Image (cartoon, helix red, strand yellow):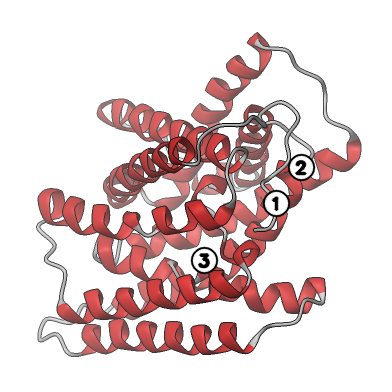
Amino acid sequence: MSNPVKSSSLAGVVSPMIPVLVCALGIFLLSAMDAAMKVLVIAVGVYNTVLWRSMLATVVAGAAWSAGTRSWPTLSVLRLHALRAVVVGIVLLSFFWGLARLPLAEAIGLSFVAPLFALLLAALLLGERIQRQAIWASLAGIAGVIIIMAGQFGQASYPKDALLGTAAVLASTVFYAYNLILARRQAQVAKPIEIMLFQNLCVAITLGFAAPWLAVALPGNLWLPLAGVTALSLAGQFLMSWAYARAEAQYLIPTEYSAFIWAVAIGWFFFNEAATWTTLTGAGLIVASCLIASRSNPRLAEPIEAAV
């Protein structure tokens, strides 16, 4: 990125190392959140997990927004909040549905193709020219996805719904990439706490339309894990928003891929998931392809964990 994200309330001159460390901490918190979400999705389903998390996050973010200096967003900004919330809702439902059916490291590795989809969307929606270097990077990323999927089919105990989980995660990355474009626009017109409030509020409202048919009361023993998930999500969002307001994306992009290391470690420790060589090789190819793409146009490879 040639220029850092502009924000009158957040911009400041700081050493690049500080935002890098802050961003890395945000990635770790969001990786832990993914693992906790997997537990909740298996327990009560993806719809109820995302619905209750969005409602709780709205209350927390609303309290923080009300306590500080605030101004009501304009109608055009509200429309942007609402549009991004719909996209984020699709991302959350599809990604966490797939996550419940795949090993944690495998799902995170597949999700890294989002910046590559962002290249295509930027060409289609913004009229930007894709450089040859980025095309080769996209092909390498596709090869990584094929290797991961080939590893699934090569397992003797291949789960029947793993293919559906893979498709759901890949579908989420397409919307995740579009969300990347919306996130850039949003960061220029709203503060992080406002973004967190209205994003979670709009997601809760959108999902709430199906509540009469799909919503169930959350069991008492799951409220504490839900609170932990919400805290991890909000903290990770805030730390990454803070970092991206103070450093160029080219410094922060590599920290995004530390999520795969955390996914391997957390998946092994909590879910007894051993990362296969095909997952490691495929994820390595995807990470390398994204780094190549970022060198040709860093703006398009900006991570989007902070957006969800």
- Of badges 3 and 1, nearer the viewer stands 1
* Apparent side of residue 303 relative to residue 73 in the rendered image (left or right): left
Q: Which of the labelled discs sits on residue 3, or is there none? A: 1
Q: Residues within 10 Å of mark 2 (few under 14, many from 20)?
A: few
Q: Residue furthest right?
A: 75
Amino acid type for the residue under numbered disc 3: Ser
The reply to whether residue 303 is visible in this rendering is: no
- Quadrant of the rendered structure where residue 24 is? top left
The residues tagged by marks 3 and 1 sit, at their Cα atoms, a distance apart of: 28 Å
- Of residue 17 and residue 162, the one placed in the foreground of this image is 17
Q: Are marks 2 and 3 in contact (CB under 8 Å)?
A: no
Task: Name the side, left or right, on which 283 lies relative to 188.
Answer: left
Q: Position of residue 93 (x, y in %)?
A: 49, 56
Between 76 and 102, the one lying in front of the other is: 76
Would you say 4 lies left or right of 46 here?
A: right
Quadrant (top left/top right/bottom left/bottom right) for the N terminus: bottom right
Which residue has dot 2 on it?
Answer: 188
Label 3, on which residue?
A: 172
Disc 1 residue type? Asn
